[in-house]
Amino acid sequence: MSEPGFWDDQDAAQDVIRRLKATGRVVEDFEKIDRELSDIADLAEMVEGDEEQERQLEAELEAAQVRYEALELQTLFDGPHDLQPAIVMIQAGTGGTDASDFAGMLMRMYQRWGEHHDMKVEINDIERNDEAGINRCELRFVGDYAYGKLRCEIGVHRLVRISPFNSAGKRQTSFVAVDVLPELADDSEIEVLDKDLRIDTYRAGGKGGQHVNTTDSAVRITHIPTGVVVSCQNERSQHKNKAAAMKVLKMRLVRQKEMEREKELAKLYGEKGEIGFGSQIRSYTLQPYTLVKDHRTTPAIEDGNVQGVLDGNIDKFIEGYLRWKLMGVKK
C-alpha cells in the first residue's frame, strides 16, 4: 500500500484492502482462540475440585469450541478466488409460473442471507415474470469470502408444493438453476484469443415504447474451444455490451477451471457427486410436509423450518457441506 502508484487504480487498491481486512480478521480470530485456550488450561489447574468453577469453565470451553470450529472452516477457503465478490445467476427452469415464483423466492433468500452477513448486495440484471416471480436475475455480493461461501449453492434447486397457480390445487414440482461466478480482480489472468471467439450482434428486446432498442446493440459471444456462450443486452451501446459479455465470459472460464479442479478432488477423496451446474443439490418441500434437504452430503443435511431457510438462514447447509468436504479431505 505504501508503494508509489498504489492508489492510481482505485478498483485494484480497494480489492487489496478488502483482502487484507478479511485475512487480518482470520489472524485475529486465531490469536484470540489461542489466548482463550491457554487461559482455560491455566484456570483448569486452579479450579480443580470446585464444581461451580468447573461448570463455568466447561461452558467457556464449549463456547471456544464453537469459535474454533467456525475458524476451522476458513481452511477450506483456499481457492484463488474464494475471497472475491460473487456473481449469483438464478434461472427459472421446468415448472412454468411456479418455477418463476420459486426463482423469485430464491433471489430473496440470497438477498436476505447477504444482509445477515453484512454483505453489499446489488441486482445487476433482472427479468420479471408477467404472472409471478422472475425468469432470471443476476446478483452481486461483496463481502468476506462471498464467492467461497456462495459457490456451495451451485446447482439445481427443487421446490415441491401445492401450486397456488393451479386451480385444481395439485402438487407441483418446479426447478431453478443457480450458478455462481467469481468477480475477477484482474481479468488478465485469463487469456482469450480473438480467433477463439465468434461474436454475433442482434437487436435487444424491450418492453415497448421508449425502451425498444432499434439498433443491433445486443452481443452474443461464443468461446469456440469450450462452447461457452454469453450474451449481454443491458447497455445501450454495442461496445459496452461486448465489454460486459467478455467480463462474464472470463468469469465462466475461471469457474470452468474450478469445476475441473473439483472433479480431480472428487477422484482423490472419493466424493460422491460434484459441484456442477445441472446437478440437483437441494429440495424444498412445502407439502405434504415441510423439509429442506441437501442431497450432496452423507448423512443428508435437513431443516424442517422451510420458512426460516427461505428467509436467508442457509448457513446450516453451506457450513454442513463444507464440513462434509473437510471430512473427505481428512480421510
Image (cartoon, grey):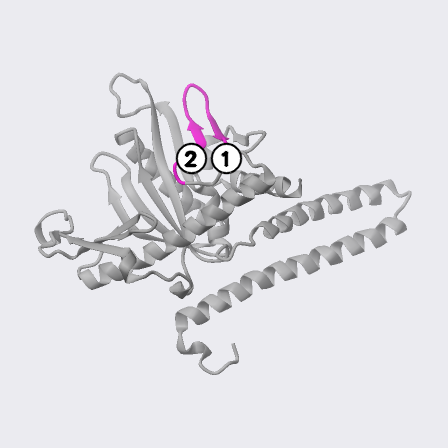
Where residue 9 sits: x, y (%)? 40, 74
Q: Is residue 284 left or right of residue 265?
A: left
Q: Is residue 139 left or right of residue 272?
A: left
Q: Residue 145 — which label?
A: none
Local crowd at mark 2 within 10 Å, few (<14), some, or many (≥20)?
some
Q: Is mark 1 on a helix, strand or loop?
A: loop
**Residue in the image at 40% along x and 40% along y:** 277
Amino acid type shown at disc 2: Ser
Q: Residue 273 — which label?
A: 1
Q: In this view, does 253 lie to the left or right of 299?
A: left
Reply above or below: 172 against 229. above
**Residue in the image at 29% along x and 51% along y:** 224
Reply above or below: 152 against 75. above
- The answer to whether any part of residue 115 appears in the image is no
Local crowd at mark 1 within 10 Å, few (<14), some, or many (≥20)?
some
Where residue 99 sits: x, y (%)? 31, 32
Q: Name the residue under label 2.
A: 279
